[in-house]
Image: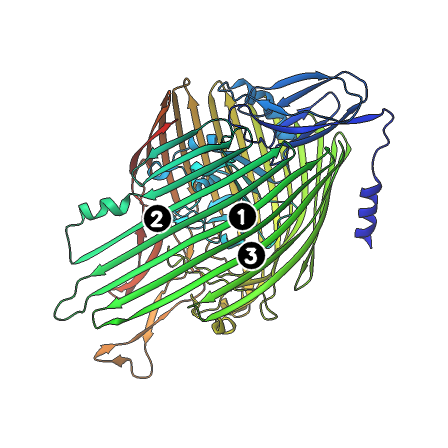
Amino acid sequence: MKRLYILIIIILGFSIRAVPQVRLFGKISDLESGEPLAGVYIKNSSALVISDANGFYSIDLPKNKVCEITYALMGYNSFCKKINIAEDTELNIHLKPSDELLPELKVSSYKLMNAFPGSHDLSYQELTKLPALLGEPDILKALQYLPSVQSANEGQGANSVRGLSPDATYILVDGIPLYNGNHSMGLISSINPEAVKALKLYTSFIPSNYGGRMGAVVSAQTKDGNVNRLTGNVALSPISARANIEIPIIKGKSALSIATRRSLTDLFVPLFNRDQTEQSNFSFWDSNIKLTYKPSSNLSISLTGLVSGDKLWSKKEGNVSEPSTKQSFNWGNYGIGLSLHSFFTGKWSSALSATTSSFRKSEEQKSGSMPSQPLQHHNSITEYAVSWNNKLYLSNSFTGQVGTNLHHKVSSIDRKEKIQQTDISGFIGAKWQIYPWLTLNAVLRAEYPFPILSPRVALSILPATNVKLDLCHDRAVQRINTVGNNNTILQTNIWFFPTEAFPPTIADQSSITFKISPTSHLKVTLAGYYTNLSNVLDYKDGYGSIDRFDQLNTRIGVGNGVAYGIEGMAEFSYNGLNGTASYTFSRTAHKINQINDGNWYHPYYDRPHRFITTWSYRLNPHWHFAATWNYTSGNLQTIATETIPGLPLGVRNGYAEYVEVYPTKNNVRLPSYHRLDVAVNYSYHKWSFGLSIYNAYNQMNVYRATSEEVDGKWVLKGLTLLPIIPSINAKFSF
């Protein structure tokens, strides 16, 4: 009943306007390419609004009164216009890209004070300036420079956000879910950087239209394509060749954007492997395609397709005593999405989308003794979804949101066992600027089956023009489950759905964020969070994999957990020099009766301390320098510490049998991880070149450990993955 009263108050809480108001609305786009621009700040003397993901905006102005409107966005020249209107008016704006630094400083205060609570933005331009592994810009790895995010294992793009497991993060590309975001055994993400226009991360107060995961949301928006002229680029790095082309189909209205990438490693590895009796190699590729049609400024239709694939294989020639063997691993993502975005007279925007996505993995082993009967294993997850999201622009101070989602998912093992589930959800939300210094965001989601109400609330307080305080509480529900471990860098997860035995995992997070900008060159953010976890899943003691769905009850345990932490970040910008420094303290603990004798334990991705600093300097329009150093506590791993003779005899086939003893789950913490990356970029006309050094001082970080008994004592041995790696990257744009 209390929630009903609150909702009534919000709906009725419009301020009475003494001055008659009219509405100015329209679409904001890039002057050169025609791409819609999200996150543009539209401001007059008494109000400020922000354009949405499709460039739409709506602002109320006094009737028959001269007003000066400013349109501002980082990386673009600000545009000011005086306007006097007597009725609702449409005004479409085209902003011109700028290479100057000054526009960014003008917008920085807007961005600090009006950012969506718990959100972070990353543009493609910012991504390309960061040091990269093997010269390859990486969307998901770039998020690890933020204090809330860290890799769950060395060299992997799987991110743990605010102490939750990597599978709790919802990754979407134009609304298409990605169930595996990695290439090359986790070293590179499968999101092609050339296809991406912007990236958004939500760590708290998840927007109302997102559900199905209990953690953060990573939303990548791909390029619509240049509707005015043919553009594109080709790029080459030691690990891959990639290309992007944007083709106008109907000038000013329709365009086709294609981005593709293929690895080069599988072509070069055989040149350095002279041992023909034992070989191994891997390859990857991905492609993104998007067709956009904009019959008017108020309507946009897009068709998106994505596909990615990986192959890892090895073979060993046989001899008299040992047969030949061959192993191959294949995995990949496939997705299609159709969306329609419309804007009605500045008062209502609607987004209707239908998507299908799939992740498939297969393993095959052949032996010379049984060449016609290979061992095979396949698993897949497929999802079909329809979403309808509506936003109501009721006034400058009040906007509403309402919509629904339908998801049907099918999980398969070895093409024989199949399970499926249909999820239905509805949501309603509102943003109410009660006073210029006080804003309330509220969301309520209802989900079925396993009916759960998920309230989400954020209160933003601005005690001064350069100070902001966000108080958030939100509930998120995991409606597709997987259980992972850190014993391999290959994709091994099996996806399954909630049941009576395994109810949906629920995360209730409360957080507080304090932001201050003492000068136009410095921004400081401090945050703290506490998350209560219900129905947490993990492998029971003695288990680490699932091969069949009927193993779930015997191998998976259910319990509770907590995750909490504090985060701090300072950002500095002055005359081409940009720097950030952040520290995170976070802990995660689970309690499951069948694990660790029912005592609390930490999951493998629990890494308490993390410090990262990133600096870049733009000497002139041609030269750009960057460096990043980070320190992180090591992962946890379950490792044997002793053995006892096997029972009942202790001897089999002439060899002594032993049973390894694991005292507790995740009983060993690996050594701390630290690394320095540096990069230099040079651009001239249509060419750009980059030189980067990954792990510049060649720190051999341990990503996994093994144990063995030596002279009666157990000794740990660390396995390392990535040494110092210099690389170059060349790119030609047209």
In three-dimensional space, the C-alpha distance between marks 3 and 2, rounded to whole angstroms, equals 25 Å
> Is 430 situated above or below 59?
below
Which numbered disc, 2 or 1, marks the residue that appears first in the sequence? 2
**Quick one: label 3 or label 2, which is nearer the N terminus?**
2
Residue type at tag 3: Tyr
Q: Identify which residue, 637 or 499, lies in the foreground.
A: 499
Q: Is residue 480 left or right of residue 360?
A: right
SS type, badge 3: strand
Asked if one can make out residue 5 in the rendered structure from this viewpoint, the answer is: yes
Q: Nearer the viewer, residue 636 or 326?
A: 326
The tag on residue 646 is none
Residue bearing mark 2: 284
The kind of residue tagged 1 is: Gly
Q: Which badge, 1 or 3, is on the more N-terminal residue?
A: 1
Q: Residue at x 72, y 33 (%)?
A: 346
Task: Give the residue pinned by disc 3.
Answer: 384
Q: In the image, which is nearer the foreground, mark 2 or mark 1?
A: 1
What type is the residue that disc 2 sits on? Answer: Phe
Are dots 3 and 2 in contact, CB under 8 Å? no
In the picture of the structure, the residue carrying the numbered disc 1 is 337
Assess disc 3: are there few (<14), some (14-19) or many (≥20) residues with their C-alpha within 10 Å of its C-alpha. Answer: many
Q: Name above or below for residue 238 compared with residue 158.
A: above
Helix, strand, or loop for circle 1? strand
Residue 627: x and y in percent read 39, 30
